[in-house]
Image (cartoon, grey):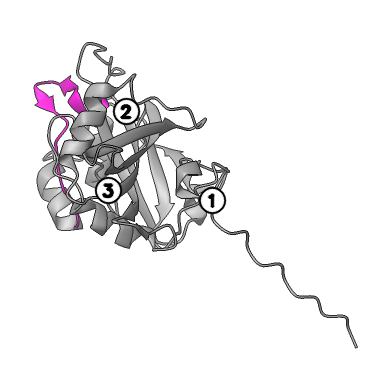
Amino acid sequence: MPLLRRQAAPPPPLDPAEWRPQRFGRKRFRSIADPIVEPNWGGVRVIARIGPGSDGSRGITLTDEDGLDCTDEFAAQALAIAAAALADELVLDGYLTVEPTQETVGVALPMVKLPTQGQVMAQLFTGTRTRRPEPPRKLDAERPIAFMAVDLLSIDGSNLIDVPLLERKRLLDSALEVDELVRITLYIRPPIGSFAVTLRALGFRELAYKPANGRYRPTGEPSDWAIASNPSH
């Protein structure tokens, strides 16, 4: 009779105060079942925590991938995130970046809420699937830095890291009021044809692939997220 051993229980999640942004792994994007696809944003990746401050007012802290507090460094953005919150307590994953406020050929990156593929295509469709190769976009460092929210990890004390990504995306859409300094990332589910073409035109050379049913790993270790090149045609 073979000796049976019980599998070890998974380690308990870190305290939310110790959460780190989920990192991308080395998995091939084609192997991700039922992916969600979004731009691969650049900038400083942070966890934003919004909740009651010591004086009873709404407080916020921004923590980078190394666990360092960068709230004072991005004070204007921190205040904007706190003001945009539509719940008393939020924990958000996002990027501090100038990319959302850039201008390209007279077209600004849109502030959009995109829960459906139809809405995505209506806002992003460029009118053609054929493009000449475009030069690399140069970012204007003088443009305002914005917070681009990509995930919602907790709301009003409810831990969401075990909730499927697609449901977290839907909750995120109703958790923030977007403005110039606070945005919610665009995303779509395959097929991604015109979406990829439009992002390429806006200068995005990489796309992020994440399983729609995936859970969030706040340990800062590589995960089942993947980055892939955005084809030019």
Look at the image and tell me in which quarter the C terminus lies.
Answer: top left
Quarter occupied by residue 97: top left
Q: What stretch of residues is rendered in magenta? A: 99-115
For disc 3, the marked residue is 187
Question: Is residue 233 within the magenta segment?
Answer: no
Front label number (3 vs 1): 1
Residue 166 point in image, percent of width and height: 32, 60
Crowding at mark 2 (Cα within 10 Å: few <14, some 14-19, many 20+)? many
Question: Is residue 104 within the magenta segment?
Answer: yes
Q: Are marks 3 and 2 in contact (CB under 8 Å)?
A: no
Structural distance between the alpha carbons of marks 1 and 2? 24 Å
Q: Is residue 98 visible?
A: no
Q: As shown in the figure, which amino acid type bears the numbered disc 1? A: Leu
Task: Give the residue displayed 28% in from the left and 50% down from the top.
Answer: 89
| First-in-chain label (3 vs 2) | 2
Crowding at mark 1 (Cα within 10 Å: few <14, some 14-19, many 20+)? few
For disc 1, the marked residue is 14
Q: As shown in the figure, which amino acid type bears the numbered disc 3? A: Tyr
